[in-house]
Image (cartoon, helix red, strand yellow):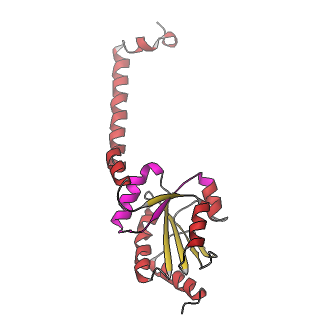
Amino acid sequence: MPWKEAKLGSMFTQPRLLIIAVSLVFVGADAFVMNSQHRGSSTVDVALASSGPAVSEITAEGLMGRVRNSKSLVKVVNLWATFCPPCVEEFPYFMKARSKFSQEQIDLIFVSLDFKSDLGEVKKFLQDQKVSFESFIKSGKDQAFIDGVHKDWTGAIPVTLIYGAKGNLIEFVPRPLTFQELDEKVLAALKKEGVR
């Protein structure tokens, strides 16, 4: 029987095709196992998603509302993801800044851009970084979120936005920061808000 006329069932009666089909199944299974090991099993993800630091979904509109409603003099918004090496590298700098300044002075708002299916991984990272306050994970369509956060933002991460007491944007930083840079930017923002 010519190949183009072969029926699906008859393909597996030929030994060579059966070996190829079985090999593909094992390769696919191996890739699934490697992916599960890399991403963590769904059982772990479900367990972590229900425990650890509070992570709520947030849209760009919700984020801007959160910024405006904060009572702190300066709001520092950091958009990051667990899959972004520069984000992970700079993350401790934000936690260090949070411990340096009072909550009256700065409100640190983390927004993860990870997929919602990676919530367990996000919570584990936040827990490892000793984040004890509410954080967020992006909700809604990517482009709507990008456009809603800042007109000049391309969607590249990490990105940090620094807002004043009334929710006015003081600085948009579309690149990783060192602790010294972050510290200087927070001090400058506090100075703009009248703190000497």
Q: Residue at x 44, y 57 (%)?
A: 83
Res. 154 in view: no
Q: Nearer the viewer, residue 94 or 196?
A: 196
Residue at the spot x=59%, y=53% of the render? 142
Number of callouts: 0
- Of residues 10 and 113, which is closer to you in this image? 113
Q: Position of residue 59 (x, y in %)?
A: 58, 58
- Residue 21 placed where, x, y %? 37, 23
User: At x 33% / y 64%, what residue is drawn?
Assistant: 128
> Does residue 19 sit above or below 162 in this rendering?
above
Query: From what the image shows, is residue 44 above or below residue 136?
Result: above
Question: Horizontally, is 38 left or right of 155 in the view?
Answer: left
Give whichever of 105, 172 is nearer the camera.
105
Q: Read off the magenta span.
A: 116-143
Query: Where on the picture, by quarter, is residue 166?
Result: bottom right
Residue nearer the viewer, 48 or 182: 48
Locate residue 30 relative to residue 88 in the image: left or right.
left
Answer whether residue 165 is magenta in the image.
no
Q: Identify which residue is drawn at 45% across, 15% down.
A: 8
Residue 69 in view in this figure: yes
Question: Magenta stretch: residue 129 in it?
Answer: yes
